[in-house]
Structure formats: structure tokens, C-alpha cells
Image (tube, rainbow, N blue to C red):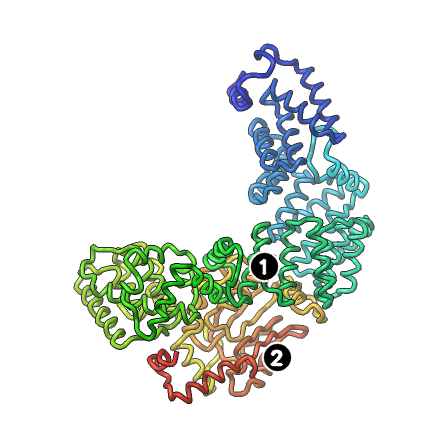
Amino acid sequence: MNRKQRRAMEKHGGTRPGGPITEAPSIAALAEIEARGLAHHQARRLPQAEACYRKILAADPCNVNALHLLGVLARQMGQYRAAVDLISEAVALNDSVPELHCNLGNALTDLGQTAEAEASYRRALALRPDYAAAHNNLGNVLQGRGEHEQAEACYRRLLALCDTEADAHTGDVLPGPVGSAEAEADGRRALALKPDHAAVYSNLGYALLMQGRSTEAEAYCRQALKLDPGYPEGHNNLGNVLKDQGRLEEAELCYRQAIDRQPDMVEAHNNLGLVLKDKGQLADAEACYRRALALRPDFADAICNLGHLLLDLGEIGHALDAAQRALSAKANTDAKALFVRCIDRSAGAGAISDIGALRRNLVRALMEPWGRPSQLAGFAASVLKQDPLIGGWVERANDAWPSRPSEPELLGPSDWLTIGDDELLIGLLESTPVCDIGLERFLTAARLILLEAAAAAADPTALDAAMLKVGCALAQQCYVNDYVFALAEGELDQALRLRAALIARIAAGEPVPALWLAAVASYVPLSSLPADAILPRSWPEDLEGLLTQQVSEPLEDRNARASIPRLTLITDGVSLLVQQQYEENPYPRWVKTASDVRPTTVAVYLHRRLPLASLGDFGRLDGNQILIAGCGTGQHSIETAQRLAGVDMVAIDLSLTSLCYAQRKSRALGSTRLQYAQADILQLGAIGRTFDLIEAGGVLHHLADPLAGWRVLISILRPGGVMRVGLYSKLARSHLVAAQALIAEGGYGRSADEVRRFH
């Protein structure tokens, strides 16, 4: 017995049932047992097949065939983890069998371990380059991950193999002619269709669709149906192509044909719902989603689509329930986006039964993040105020307003630890401006307590870690809200005195209490201090985020100004005024945006936004050219770059300060196909470029003559291109008009002090 056999023996119990090793069945007897097991397996008598395989392993724990077959059987029974373990053991004993690696990839795919599955399929192909099933299954894994170009290559290689009459059987591979019923059905269909295979053509069509190559995609999907008119997945995929072309009536017919042929095809029910929603048949769309969920209750796509529909109908509570359910089923990009959209539309937490689960999702949505944190801020504040401790502090701070309660009246020494441990509160402070009056008043009072504590902290070695953590988060909040919190009489003077003491100690090379930096940064940005004196020092870890935000990043932005290309001159009087405003106050000072975004093509993006419009084919081989006209600090341009695959983007703005902010954020998020440049929209006709898509949101109305800017943008739009324009309407600005009237009535000025006083 070799070492591998001894290890396997120990794993399977150390001894064989029924007697010592010498009583093991002969090789011929084991082969006979395996044949019986295969016969049971073929006839779907899975318990009897399992008994045979286990009998073989009891006698020969290192029997590769038995381990492999038992793993395949486990997968058929939905025991995916057991399948991976068993087939992995077989692979460890014999790494040279491509079928083992392919079936291991299948089980890993079932577990959602796509990277590991990909490695298994590639190993199978290294052993057998013409292994059709491995090419197909690798293509499916890549397709599921959104890597459609690589998936296309797999399917094309498979079609080339089909031309040489390779076996395109794609299910579990068993020794001999035996497999699961589903695998055999796939195999019979593939063999019947040689050298052309409907499933491969259909999958290739979908891969092309997701690359925006709609015309090619349609041709391949129709070829699949020519080969197999009854192929349900083929009708479903053709429906997807037609839907994204805006041919909704034809797409609906395709989905209904798929359902006629396979009534339990949940994907077709779900897709039919999407088409019906685009056609405005909302009740029918809802019925489709619910039918899909009746067939598969944990089908996350249908849960999300139902949630979006309910939200559009104003049923926010039910939509949020759907979002929570979708996150439990599969926390994918769509489920996260639905959750953010529901939170954004919700007035407040209200009477939510499972506030704990919602709070956990809210923390993740803020920290990862799942969308713009500003969309979550109001709801997060509502949840925080429901907390007995935080709600009590907020109530006491508001009862005392405009006075500021002292530390014993509002917060005790142990309360800082409670605040610092609240992930939702700290995450909110670090991510986006707080827009809740009650919570802001509590934070304003807490800031003054921190300032007084810092002023009293003369010993640089003394450190209240909890207070420092909260102080750093509060300082980051004040920075992103442009220091708008109200000031009590003498409060700013006290902060500036501490700042002067901080500068003096740094200049003298003396130690500085860490809390001083957090307190000062809550009133004035640390970028006003000498960076070369602050950054080289050793500071507590809790200061890292604050120093990055207020020292390192502003320094990086200042150094980057010379690197921003200047495409045009800025000479228009109004443009110069707008430029000055945003040089002084880049807006918004956003911190995070959604990090988990599923990219799509320009064609699919536009057809989904404008399902009834007649649009051209945007599947340019050299990549679509996109202009973001007026990008500000880059939040929208980065989100657009993340959303669209295969594009080259240029984002312009008047303000260099804003552009440097945007460029830094783009670099941090890995947006490599996005370039920034300084330019005036009115001068863009001279740059010698045209674009397939132009986005101008929130910018044209800043021009002295908005229509002049509109005409310039139209002049650089390619024939058949699309321009997306966002304007501030009178209705949308009504609250701003009311605020302006109140400012005029009170005689408030434009200085920072006057802004704070009005706020």
C-alpha cells in the first residue's frame, strides 16, 4: 500500500468494512461492482449507484473512478460541496484525466466559485485541446462573469471543433456511454446537429449581443433556431437580442415561444416581464415576475425586477422587502442597486420589523459602497435616530439648541466608545454630508466637546482612542460638507488658537497630541498646514483616513494641475464666472461611488434607457467615443465609464480644481479609458473630434446662451449619435427659489460665515 492509499484509507475510516485488507475484492470483482453502479446511474437509480460506488471505496479508497462517479452523483443530487470534495480527491490521485477537471469545473460553477472553475476547465483543455465540453463550459463561466469577448472566443473554438465533428456533449462526463439524463439529452442533441450546434450558436449570439454587436448576434441566434426550431433557450436568446434592439413585439413573441416549449423556463417568464414593462403593461409584467418566482422562489433576477416594478408603482415598502429578499438570495449588482434605489425613495425607516438586517445591509451599502452614499444618507440618519442611545443624544442636543450641552450633559466618557463602535454612524460621517437637522445639531454639539477636550489635552502621549476615532470621522464629515456646521460664539476663535499652537509645535519639532489634528480639521482643512511637516511624522492609525483626505489628496491635486490638457481657451464672461466659483468650491466633494458595477455596451445601455426609440447600431469595432460635457468633480463621468464597456471617454470642465479631483478619483477606481481636459463648451467645435454619445447634465443652463452651447454639441455629434441632456427646470428648482427669497429677505451675504449663519 503506497502513501496516497494509506492517506485515503485513513480518510475513509482506516479499515475496510467486513475484514482486513487481505479480504479486499479482486480487481475483477471491483470492475463488476462498478459496472452495476454505472447501470444504476444510467437508469437514475441513484441510491443504488451510490451504494456501489461506496462499496468500491470501502475496499479501495484510492479508486479514482469511484471517487469521480460519486462526485458526479453528488452534483446531480444538488450536493455541490460534496461533489467538489470527491472529484478534487480523484484529481489529486490522477491529475492527467481531462474529464475529472471538467466535472470539477462544473461542480465549482454550481458553488459560484467561477475563478476556480475557470482554472479547472483550462487544465482540462491543456490536457486535451480539442475537448469540446470544456470549451463550452469555460465559455459559459466567462459569459456569466461578463467577460463576453473571451466567451466568444471559446464558442468560436467550439464551432471550429464542431466542423471536425468533435463531441459537443456539455454535461457531466462519465466513463463509458453513461451520464445523467440531462447530460444525455444535451449529448443526443449535439450529436444530431453535427457539425452545427444550436446551443453553441445561441450562446455565441448572446456573447455578441453583450458586446453591442447586435446584428451579428441576431444572425447567430436565428441560426441556432434554424438548426433546432424547438430549442427554448434559442427563442429566449433571440428575444434578448430583439428586446435590446427595441423590437419589443418580436421579442415578446420569442419569449412566449420559449415558454410554450418549456413552461417552467423561469428566465423566459422574467424576460417577458421586462418587455411587457417596457410596453407599459405593468400588471402583466408583474404577473410574469410572480410566475417566475412561483417556479423558483430564490430567482434573484425576478425578485429584483419585481422590486423595481413595485417601486415604480409607489409601493416602496414592498419594493424594499423585495430588495432584502434578493440580497438574501444572491447579493449581486442588481440586488444592491435595487436596495439603494429603495432607500433613496424611502422617507425614513418607519416601522420596519427587521431593523437589524436592514441596518447591516445599510452599513454594507455605505462602506463598499453599493451606490452613491448621498442616496442613503437621509434613511441612515432616520435609522440612527431610532437607536435608543443615539436618539437620546440627538433629542437632548435639539432640546438645548442653540445652546451647546457640555460633555456631562450630552456625552459621558464611555459614550465615545459607543459612537466609535457604531459602523453606520461612522460610515455615514466618512462618506457623505449629513442632511438631517436633528442629527446635525447633535454632531455640532459633539464637535465643540471634542474641541474643548483637545484644547485641554496638553500631554501628547495621552490618547483617548475612542474620542480620536470619532473626532477623525467628524472632521471628515466637516470637510465634505464644506464646514457648514453652525458656530457658537467664540468657537472658531478657539479652534484657530489650537491651530496656531499645532503649527508652533510642528515648527519646533515637538510632539503633538493626535486629538489636536482631528479637532482642528473639524473647523479648517489640514491642507492649510505645511504638508511636508505633517506627513513624515508617525501618527496613530485612526488619523490615516483624515490625513489622506485633507493633506495627501489636496497635495496630489495641486501637483496634477499642470498635467490636465487644455483643449480650448476660456474667454466668455459667464464661463469665467462659473469657472471661478468651482475653482474656489469644487462640487460635490464626493467620497465614494458604486464599486460593483456590471458593464454593458453603449447599444444595450441606450436601448434599455430608450426602449421605444429607433437607434442605430453602436457596435463600433474601434470603441464608441463619448463626451461628458461639464464633468465637475467626476462622479457622473466615472459612473458612466464603469457602466459602459469598450468606450473611449473624454470628460471636460472649466475648473482645473474639479478636474484634478476627478482625475484622482478615476485613477483610484481604475477607470483607464477616461481622459480629462479643460475646455469651454462654446469652443468645442474647434477640437476636431466627433462623438457617438454626448452627455451634458446640469451644465447648459449655466451658459449665457444655452442654445448656443446646444448647437456646438450637436455639431460634434456623429450622424446617428445620441445626446443626453439634463436641465434644471423651474419645478425642480422651486425649493431653491424659495431659499433665495429667504436669503434676500434676511439680507444674508455670500461669505462662509454668512452661509453658516443662514444654514
Please state the horizontal and vertical placement of residue 83, each as a whole percent of the image.
61, 34
User: Callout 2, which amino acid?
Assistant: Ile
Can I make out residue 450 in this image?
A: no
Marker disc for residue 520: none
Q: Nearer the viewer, residue 690 or 329?
A: 329
**Residue 709 vertical position relative to residue 201 in the rendered view, above or below:** below
Q: Secondary structure at mark 2?
A: helix
Q: Which residue is mark 2?
A: 714
Please state the horizontal and vertical placement of residue 576, each as a whole percent of the image.
44, 84
User: Callout 1, which amino acid?
Assistant: Pro
Marker disc for residue 599: 1
Give the quarter of the figure containing the N terminus: top right
Can I make out residue 731 in this image?
A: yes
Q: Nearer the viewer, residue 224 or 491?
A: 491
Residue 624: image quadrant is bottom right
Left/right placement of residue 363 relative to residue 132 reads left
* Residue at image point 68% right, 52% down: 293
Q: Secondary structure at mark 1?
A: loop
Instruction: Work out which residue is located at the far top of the displayed protein and give it.
Output: 22
Q: Nearer the viewer, residue 743 or 518?
A: 743
Left/right placement of residue 336 relative to residue 230 reads left
Left/right placement of residue 691 relative to residue 202 reads left
Residue 187: image quadrant is top right
**Residue 541 vertical position relative to residue 129 in the rendered view, above or below:** below
Give the quarter of the figure containing the C terminus: bottom left
The reply to whether callout 2 and callout 1 are in contact (CB within 8 Å) is no
- Which tag, 2 or 1, sits closer to the chain's start? 1
Please state the horizontal and vertical placement of residue 248, each as a whole percent of the image.
75, 64
Q: Nearer the viewer, residue 664 or 412?
A: 412
